[in-house]
Image (cartoon, rainbow, N blue to C red):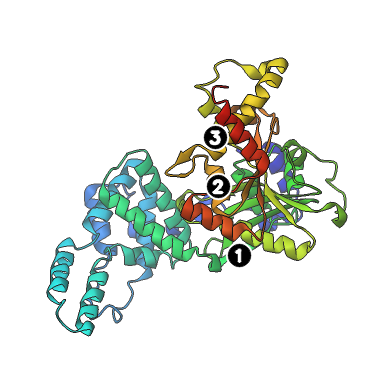
Amino acid sequence: MIPRPVIHALRSCVGYRRHRAVPTAVLRAPDVGVRRWYSTPIRGSVTGMDEILARVVAPVPTYETRDKSPPPPESNSLEFMHFYSSLEKDGKLGFLNKLSQDFGVDHKGVSELAARLVDTQLRDLATILQVEDRLRYSLTPRYKPLLNYISRVEGGVKFLVDLRADVLEMISSKASESPHIRDLNGTLKSLLSEWFSVGLLQLERITWQSPCEILQKISQYEAVHPVRNWTDLKRRVGPYRRCYAFTHAAMPGEPLVVLHVALTEDISDNIQSIVREFSTLNSKEDVNKINAAIFYSISSTQAGLQGVELGNYLIKRVVRELQSEFPHMSLFSSLSPIPGFSSWLQGLLSHEWMHSERLSRVLEPALMRLCAWYLYGEKRRGYALNPVANFHLQNGATMWRINWLADTSPRGAANSCSIMVNYRYFLNETSKNSSLYLQNKVIMASEPVLGLVSQFQKNSKL
């Protein structure tokens, strides 16, 4: 929940009434103008599902008529959206199971075309290419055109993003282990990756003058360092700070991924100086004090866009934006949490060391060595085990500095023993570093980090 002071502050913004968030019921476009089709509330019965799907999922045109068939009426898409939105959780699961299984790929037709392709291998190239094209066309699930048509109606893209979030939740919770549901997820991901390609995204800088509903969402979506109050929110979009978001024309007013940046003299070694420093709240920026850009929080806001790469592109776009604003800027780094480190360490430490200052001093060398090894040496399929490390290393950053007691909040202590790490972006090396990591699984790290790793290897028993 967004803190109550933030809501009061947002409501006090000039023009709040003009920018007030549209009520949820209005945002659900499928509800508008569709209720007339139903004289009684929809209960999601199997019969009702069959009738709806038979009506709205059009037959796939033949190969010869694929470019000549007229599109179905928009009401089909609206009817599907309204019916799905009216269902409870179990009803949605049954509905998507039926959609994916009964209206997927024509497996018999695919098998026949595959056999035909084998038979044509001795024919001329033109014949082979045509049969291959027919086979490719036959692999399209029958429901895919419906998804495309839904994306074209108002609110349709957001509906499909949320629908995929439901599908992902069904898969992760094992509510459904149907291969048809997994295929539906793959189809949705492929479509969303096309619709949310980087060329179709708009970069927006968020300021205190941005619409109130946008500021409210920025606060609600913050997943790394929760916003505490209205002053905190104002600070994060004020002097010596930048907040950027990717948006999409099909989802107006909805930030897709949000990046918070601190503008500092040097690369920060703790988060307190960034999220709890309010001395410059109303000051004027001094360009001579801005040498570094610290990426201290990046949050994806749409569960349905999982696996659709947006964060890497956002950082690269923001770097270009900052270089344009501050041509002299040369230091780019994250200040990243290390989720999972404390859990990984629980098997090695069983006492409450944070309550003892003396013990904390004694443990610092060992924990720093352990953390360095966790970040650098612990792997999953050859890549960094830690997801935040993996993200920045894929993006070409260097594992630059590990910072002791950098986040002393309860959350920081619980997640990573209060340690944080800088992943530094050397702009002339990021492409090379990214390729080395992705292709050869080589992690670029500074000498101090490698020194800690070496110490761990020499003294692995603490």
Task: Give the mark nearest the N terminus, 1 or 3.
Answer: 1
Q: CA distance from mark 2 to mark 1?
A: 32 Å
Residue 168 shows in the view: yes
Residue at image mark 3: 374
How crowded pointer 1 is (Cα within 10 Å; few <14, some 14-19, many 20+) is rated as some
Q: Quadrant of residue 361?
A: top right
* Residue under the point 45% across and 55% down: 161
Helix, strand or loop under label 3: helix
How far apart marks 1 and 3 lie (CA) works out to: 36 Å
Residue labelled with disc 2: 443
Q: Position of residue 351 (x, y in %)?
A: 58, 15
Task: Give the number of the mark in front: 3 or 2.
Answer: 2
* Distance in Å between CA atoms under marks 3 and 2: 13 Å
Position in image of residue 365 (x %, y %): 66, 26
Does residue 313 lie above or below 3 as drawn? below
Residue located 87% across and 49% down the image: 283
The answer to whether any part of residue 225 appears in the image is no
Marker disc for residue 202: 1
Left or right of residue 444: residue 135: left
- Whichever of callouts 2 and 1 sits on the residue coming sooner in the sequence is 1
